[in-house]
Amino acid sequence: MNYKDIVNAVTNNLEINLYPTQEKIAESIINPNKEKIHICCYTRYGKTYSVAFGICLYILLNDDKKIKVIAPKTGQANILRDYIIDFLIEHESFRNLLPLETDKTERLQKQMSKKKIDFTNKCSLEILTAGGDLMGYGSDLLVIDEACKIEDEKYNKEINRMIEGKVVEVGNPLHRQNFFWRHFNNDKYLNIHIGEKQGIKEGRHSKEYFDEKALELGGKNTREYQILYKSRFPDSSEASLIRWSWIEKAVEKETNIKGKTIYGLDVAAAGNDLNVLTKIKTNKQTYKIENINNWSCNDTMETVARVTEKIDKQNQVNIDSIGIGKGVADRLKEKGYNINLINVGEKSKDKTMLNKKAEYYWYLRTLFEEQRINIPNHSKLKNQLTALKIEYTSKNKKKIKDPSKSPDYADSLMLACSKEKQEELMISKYDPFEK
């Protein structure tokens, strides 16, 4: 079956005009062979309109399907819902799906204002928000609108469990700190991406339109224009500690080092946290991750046993002395291992840093910026590094703001690379807070 022909036939019959990529969006939603779809287009292109049309087509072509739409907030969910309402009310082919008299427009609008709509072919459409409890919901078609504005924790714990069939993610490329960015780089997803050049080529907007928008935003190289009209994910947020481009270069860098082996051990506190042991090799100037081990366990003695299987007694192991890490470190010391306790909450000698954690992370940042570190292409480590934020206290001291989930891989690397040499901490050329 040619699903593109179906889209063209319906649009011609209903006298609906779609641009080429808008047609592609609608076709991908009704095509059962395309199960994971990622839609990232410039603002005002009409992606939400296209998705709404695709949803209506999906309902028209299928029986007994559960369609769920999730957005960060009610107002955002209503934008997509209102487009769907317009299609259902204005076009007879869609209107016949509704269990009401088609000439009673007022009754139709009242029915459509509900969060859940049932259709005559046993399909249902439900509008949900990420702020609510999503546990227990399942779907044949799940549409996540404004996906870049939904926190990763919400996606991982609740939304991901709702996916039983097709999933469509829609949004603007606001940042690289959640699932929307990861899926943009995931070859399992059909990526529909459109920026200003394609918009001009399709005739959706003119070059003059984009020139005017660039003038309003201060130029085409500004962060806002890159996101909104070139539809590019920013390299980092203004408060990011480590730029994504630095991380990518650290993956590409090939380094052979003859030097000292050091381990960084981040001990799991509780819940879903992982114990992470990172092995690095360093000659004091360049660093390379040689191995990363992780395991889930909150028992101190079992953690000690796991660590002793991975390390040699002569190699240094850096462990945070705060909390449960102290117990693990003490037991390893008793067994004769070379343990270096680090209190990341301790006051830093550097007057610009809130504590040792900020100091050590700033040094790690320097290693990435100056391309003095080589890391594996480890998705969790990369995502945790780019999610770290740097803030300023009221006394103008730098502090590290962790993401919502414990950055265990990043902390383990920070501990392994920890260094206090003052002159090496402050040579960063890039400062997102530079005035």
Image (cartoon, rainbow, N blue to C red):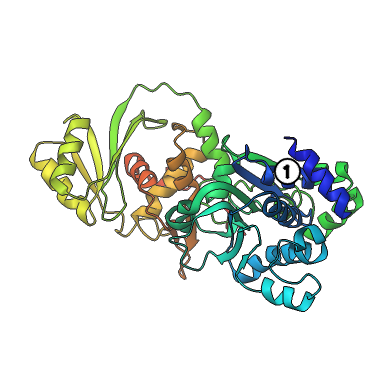
Provide the secondary structure element on which disc 1 rests: helix
Residue 400 percent coordinates (x, y) = 43, 57
> Within 10 Å of the Cα at label 1, are there few (<14), some (14-19), or many (20+) other Cα atoms?
many
Residue 85 percent coordinates (x, y) = 73, 66
Q: Nearer the viewer, residue 187 or 149?
A: 187
Dot 1 corresponds to which residue? 27
Please indicate whether residue 419 sits to the left or right of residue 3 in the image. left
Residue 39 percent coordinates (x, y) = 67, 47
In the rendered structure, which amino acid carries the disc numbered 1?
Glu
Residue at image coords 48%, 45%? 383
Residue 204 shows in the view: no
Against 195, residue 74 (above or below) is below
Q: Which part of the image, by quadrant, shows the C terminus?
A: bottom right
Residue 397 shows in the view: yes
Q: Nearer the viewer, residue 178 or 154?
A: 154
Residue at image coords 24%, 38%? 317
Residue 140 percent coordinates (x, y) = 56, 51
Residue at image coords 13%, 41%? 332
Against 85, residue 334 (above or below) is above
Q: Which part of the image, by quadrant, shows the N terminus?
A: top right
Counting every numbered tag in the picture gives 1
Please indicate whether residue 305 sits to the left or right of residue 33 in the image. left
Q: Quadrant of residue 294?
A: top left
Q: Nearer the viewer, residue 55 or 155?
A: 55
Residue at image coords 45%, 69%? 395
